[in-house]
Image: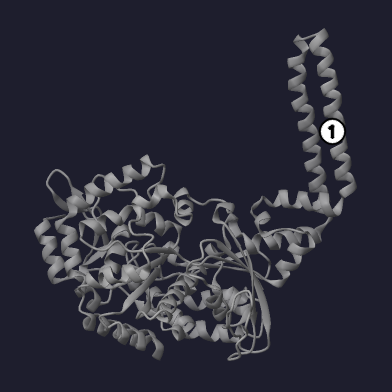
Amino acid sequence: MVVFFCLCERGKPFYNEQMKIETAIASGSASFKIKTIPFDKIPHQTRVFLDFQNNSGDLRAFYPGKNKSLKEYSEEVLANFKIDRNQLSDALREECACYGGEAKTLENIELLRDEKCVAVVTGQQAGLFSGPIFTIYKALSAIKQANNLRDRGMKAVPVFWIASEDHDIDEANRTSILGQDGEITTITNSPEDFNENTPVEFIRLGKDIDKAVRELMRNLPKTEFTREIEECLTELYNPDETYSSAFAKLILRLLGQFGLILVCPMNRGLRELCSPIFTAAIEKRMEINTALHKRNQELADAGYHSQVMVGEDFFPLFYLDENNQRNALRLDLDTNKIKSIHTDQVIEADELIEVAKKTPGRLSPNALMRSVLQDYLFPTVCYFGGSAEIAYFAQNQVIYEILDRPVTQFRHRASFTIIDRKGSRNLDRYELDFEQIFQHKEEILAEIIEEFISKDTAETFDQVERSVAEQLNLLEAQLSVSEPTLSDNLSNRRRKILWHLETLRKKFHRAETFKNEVLKRRIDYLTTSLYPENGLQERTMNIFYFLNHYGFNFIDWLYEAIDPDEREHQVMYL
């Protein structure tokens, strides 16, 4: 399917017969088209993800209620929501004040006090300069769905959960763009004085963050939007900010106009609200452990993988010590006690329950428990996530059931590849479809050389291969009658002869590529910009690469292009 969008001056609606949509840009006019492609045409997709997107019957047992309408499911969510909404909203207002939220966000926080209001939730780790652009796609997906629900008469707000408890600093501490040299450039920071088990909420950016900002800007070409980007990052990313606080301020700067509510789960007020669910998880630890092992076996029997390895001693929580180190906890199956794998400390279950009741801020969910906590804290009508989170939900559905919680509806976030005019010209020049970029670069070059650069030589190779095959067939037919023992020998030599011809053809491709530097640069640009590091662009590229080219209104374009019900990958031609 190809959908055309036309963008006109801000505030002026444009009616499109194919899409019936309004959108805007800051000034001037522009247009773009979107082509969708099924995920099963994209390499490296898991079976769980593909079957989920295709609504396969094989997966339905692992996602109960998947096909319920959100209106129907919202009634179940609201009937089971137990959190004090005023206490929740008060804590969120405190967060909003810290991060510079706009009036629209405050309005949505107030709306959340209404007993009929539901939440559309998403979340991501606090990556450097917002991390890969799919983080923005997640947030905009939740925003668009919440607005769609409101258009249908429901009260709904978008919520973004910052995974500030995570302690994987190596993942949080990097982001990538396409540099001016045409190569993927990865920018990192050097934080100071932290332990490998410290949540990113407590890790300050440190004095080297100024260098990271300068490195990012140095690798972006100068455009009319460069200065605004540099001012934004210089203001928000300073040494005293933590990875979490800088991320939160940046997301609100980019998306606050949509009323997005940010959640830092380390907030004391929010943690106090989590005490009952922490307590229940500890009390039912053995049931959770047993159910997860059973679920993993069920997934394996159905031919699916488990996203999280669940050991015999699995326990769903971490413990934050007095130094704010995140200690993984495990069950001691011999004693039914709980132990810290980092300190060897052994904790009685009753003692940990007291922690959950009196100081719940000391507890932190693991990957399988996190969404259960989110959906206890918020009246979540649906969650937007990526393929890995889809696999999480196939596992942790049993935790919801054990803790007597409605199993959250899941939606895959919007998925885009952005193709600029240079990329579009090169695709058109060589009559390439976007899907062909998934091939090895050498294969793409070979096809172009044979079709556009040296077509006559390519045809000669084809003729020689056909002629050799014909003559060998003739020889084999004669030998099979006169000397049958030589027929098998000829079969082996046939493979060697054809292999030598194919090798010669590949050398011809390399020689032509070497002579045609312009062609090589164009294909290098296509593969690096559209399929960097042999993966989808959204998993590598940072949004500031695109904001530098198109300005902050690029976010408006993405918002308008998002359809929360879209099940395919979207290729946006700008």
Quadrant placement of the C terminus: bottom right
Q: How many marks?
A: 1
Name which residue type carries label 1: Arg
Task: Give the residue drawn at x 84%, y 39%.
Answer: 462
Give above or below for 58 relative to 234.
above
Left or right relative to 338: residue 445: right
Q: Quadrant of the N terminus?
A: bottom right
Residue 167's x, y, as percent? 35, 64
Residue 382 falls in which quadrant of the image? bottom left
Residue 530 position within the rendered picture, expressed as x and y whole percent measured from the top left? 63, 62
Residue depicted at x 35% and y 67%: 194
User: What residue do we see at 83% from left, 8% from top?
Assistant: 482
Residue positioned most to the top: 482
Q: Is residue 388 left or right of residue 571?
A: left
Q: Which residue is mark 1?
A: 466
Whether residue 345 appears in this view of the structure is no
Residue 17 location (% of width, % of height):
64, 77
